[in-house]
């Protein structure tokens, strides 16, 4: 028996076995990251689709916190529970909680979902790079600098494309401006997560809980009337599952697991595919056909994101 145990130990720790385990872990991390990117990329499209069924921005936020708030409560009280920790969580909620979702969804009233799916991550990328450079003294590499310039040029092309577009969005420049504001909010949120010692899962749970309490108070005190149940039942179920379960919980957990396996840089690179997913789904589901300048702007922003997120691995010292 001892001989068999020794043979099993040697087999499990052989270079071939370790390579197979590493390869399997990388594939799993890649799978988790792609699933998170698909969920994130689909969110603008699913939200815009719901708004075609008279779903209001306020009702979208209700769906976002309806299940996520109560279900994540057990995680909210892990770690430090000091007044300072909860004040930090409350401040982060203003940037990435119900207020952020209200801002984003209002943008869909004026601009296509594909714009939101690309402008927001592009703006987040700019905020992260500039804040890292000026506040954390991080070096701006050539790919990051070129990527930043491409994102800015892409935003300009989108704003010019709004003048030539011919569809139902007459004031899409307003929507694009709202998306830029949302990107500034989320970019500030992600930067604060880098400098504040907080646990990502605990933070998400606290943001969901605080948002739930805030929306509940607003609902009963200010706006008790909602029209969610006037929607077709199948669309209501789709919105509830996607908004409150897939986006608010599953995507966060999948991305966190991907970061654990692959590292932050590689996981972020995979997540950068979500804008492309948004554009494809918006074309297929919402029939959004961008104008020539809009195509140029969207493509330039996507290129800028890919360049900006590119990192060079340090050379291995022999």
Image: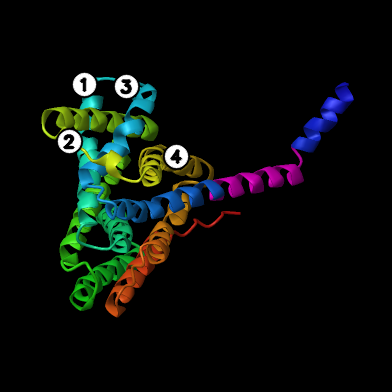
**Whole-percent x and y of residue 62?**
26, 37
**Whole-percent x and y of residue 193?**
31, 40
Q: What residue is rendered at 49% in x and 56% in y?
A: 314
Q: What residue is rendered at 80% in x and 34% in y?
A: 10
Residue designated by label 4: 250
Q: What residue is rendered at 33% in x and 72% in y?
A: 289
Residue designated by label 1: 83
Residue designated by label 2: 225
Quadrant for the C terminus in the image: bottom right
Depicted 258 relative to depicted 90: above or below: below
Depicted 160 relative to depicted 79: above or below: below
Residue contact between numbered discs 3 and 2, judged by CB atoms under 8 Å? no
Q: Please tell me whether mark 1 or mark 2 is closer to you in this view.
A: 2
Q: In whole angstroms, how far apart are the C-alphas of marks 1 and 2?
A: 34 Å
Q: Which mark is first along the chain, 2 or 1? A: 1
Q: State the residue in front, 302 or 143.
A: 302
Residue contact between numbered discs 1 and 2, judged by CB atoms under 8 Å? no
Q: In whole angstroms, how far apart are the C-alphas of marks 3 and 2?
A: 37 Å
């Amino acid at each position: 028996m001892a001989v068999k145990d020794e043979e099993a130990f040697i087999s499990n720790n052989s270079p071939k076995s370790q390579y197979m385990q590493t390869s399997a872990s990388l594939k799993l991390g890649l799978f988790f990251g792609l699933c998170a990117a698909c969920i994130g990329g689909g969110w603008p499209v699913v939200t815009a689709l719901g708004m075609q069924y008279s779903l209001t921005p306020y009702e979208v936020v209700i769906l976002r916190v309806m299940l996520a708030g109560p279900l994540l409560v057990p995680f909210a009280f892990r770690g430090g529970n000091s007044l300072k920790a909860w004040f930090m969580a409350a401040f982060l909620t203003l940037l990435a909680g119900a207020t952020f979702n209200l801002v984003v969804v209002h943008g869909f009233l004026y601009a296509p979902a594909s714009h939101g799916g690309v402008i927001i991550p592009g703006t987040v990328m700019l905020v992260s790079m500039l804040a890292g450079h000026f506040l954390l003294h991080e070096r701006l590499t050539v790919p990051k600098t070129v990527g930043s310039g491409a994102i800015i040029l892409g935003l300009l092309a989108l704003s010019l494309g709004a003048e030539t577009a011919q569809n139902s969005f007459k004031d899409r420049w307003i929507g694009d401006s709202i998306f830029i504001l949302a990107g500034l909010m989320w970019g500030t949120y992600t930067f604060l997560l880098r400098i504040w010692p907080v646990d990502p899962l605990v933070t998400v749970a606290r943001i969901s809980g605080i948002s739930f309490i805030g929306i509940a108070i607003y609902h009963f005190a200010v706006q008790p009337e909602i029209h969610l149940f006037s929607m077709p039942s199948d669309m209501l179920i789709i919105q509830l599952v996607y908004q409150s379960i897939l986006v608010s919980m599953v995507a966060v957990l999948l991305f966190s697991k991907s970061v654990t396996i692959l590292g932050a840089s590689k996981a972020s690179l995979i997540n950068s595919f979500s804008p492309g997913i948004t554009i494809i789904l918006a074309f297929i589901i919402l029939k959004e056909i961008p104008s020539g300048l809009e195509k140029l702007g969207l493509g330039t922003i996507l290129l800028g994101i890919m360049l900006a997120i590119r990192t060079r691995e340090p050379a291995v010292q022999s």
